[in-house]
Amino acid sequence: MKIALFDMDGTLTKPRQQIDPGMIDALDALSCYCDVGVVTGSGVSYVMEQLSDWILGSSGGRARFFPCNGTQEWLFRGDRGFERTYHVSMIDEIGENKLRELCKFLLQQQLLCMSDFPEMPAAGDFIVNRESMLNYCPPGRSCSPEQRETFKGLDIRHRIRMNVFRRLNTFMEHKDSECVAALGGNTSIDIYPRGWDKTYVLKHLEDINKISFVGDRCMEGGNDRALYDFVEESPGGLACSTTSVQQTIDLVMNQLIPYFSEN
């Protein structure tokens, strides 16, 4: 079995935006040669929202969706809609007390950020429990595209997320929280139990004999790094880093299709 795995935000779509027609054409062409999997730190509601034009219009039926770093698997069943075929729970893994400690620490960090950077957007939904991970977003998951751009500029200048990331790692090590963190997209930090990074998706792919992965956060600390490294080090695996949706389309047409079309 062959599968091409993709991150979503910054790879298949612009952050929190709908998939482009050009990307739909590229994925449909790729699906002639392999399954196409989307492994993202986002929850399934974002997958349905951002990829709906591809999901509803695709004729291949070879798409597999792995929200929350692959700790969930959802399949699209046509008229029956999405069905969750697998999931695990963070609270079952680390316990309620450790989850509460993490949430308390993140709330303290949010107050600190809002105090230090009063110009930072504060749109709400700062901590989202996605069942198998926590997503912490200093400007809030409810921020508008304009607020997102404002935060990105502040983050570049003041390294807001990176400073929180370092403090969070120190806290988790001191508390033995059994969790790790990774930078997600341009505005957030993902926190999840050890081993629940994007390599978790491999638990669903034991019969795969040819694999590729494309992501935009493959740098140290990025939430695509672990899966990128695994695929790159796999015999015959193809791992690619992208910086834009258009570059992803080019990678699909010029590298992935030739790779999967080979016997």
Image: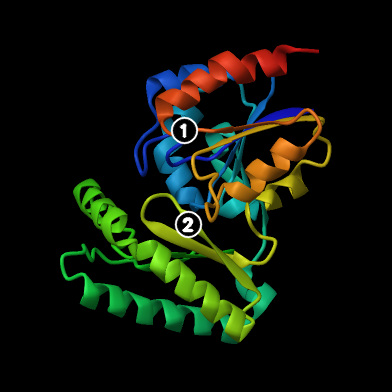
In front: 184, or 89?
184
Instruction: Work out which quarter of the rendered image holds the N terminus and state it.
Output: top right
* Quadrant assignment, res 117: bottom left
Side of 260 where 243 appears, left or right: left
Q: Which circle's residue, 1 or 2, is located before the other in the chain?
A: 1
Asked if one can make out residue 137 in the rendered structure from this viewpoint, the answer is no
- Residue type at mark 1 is Leu
x and y percentages locating residue 104 in the rendered image: 44, 83
Q: Nearer the viewer, mark 1 or mark 2?
A: 2
* Quadrant assignment, res 27: top right
The disc placed on residue 183 is: 2
Residue labelled with disc 1: 12
In front: 209, or 172?
172
Residue displayed at 74% across by 31% down: 237
User: SS for tag 2?
Assistant: strand
Q: Residue furthest left?
A: 119
User: SS for tag 1?
Assistant: loop
Residue displayed at 67% across by 62% down: 88
x and y percentages locating residue 94 in the rendered image: 66, 77
Count of labels shown?
Answer: 2
- Residue type at mark 2 is Leu
The disc placed on residue 198 is: none
Q: Residue furthest front?
A: 157
Task: Using the image, determine if residue 8 lies above or below residue 54.
Answer: below
Instruction: Kindly report the distance in space between the C-alpha atoms of the residues bearing marks 1 and 2.
Output: 18 Å
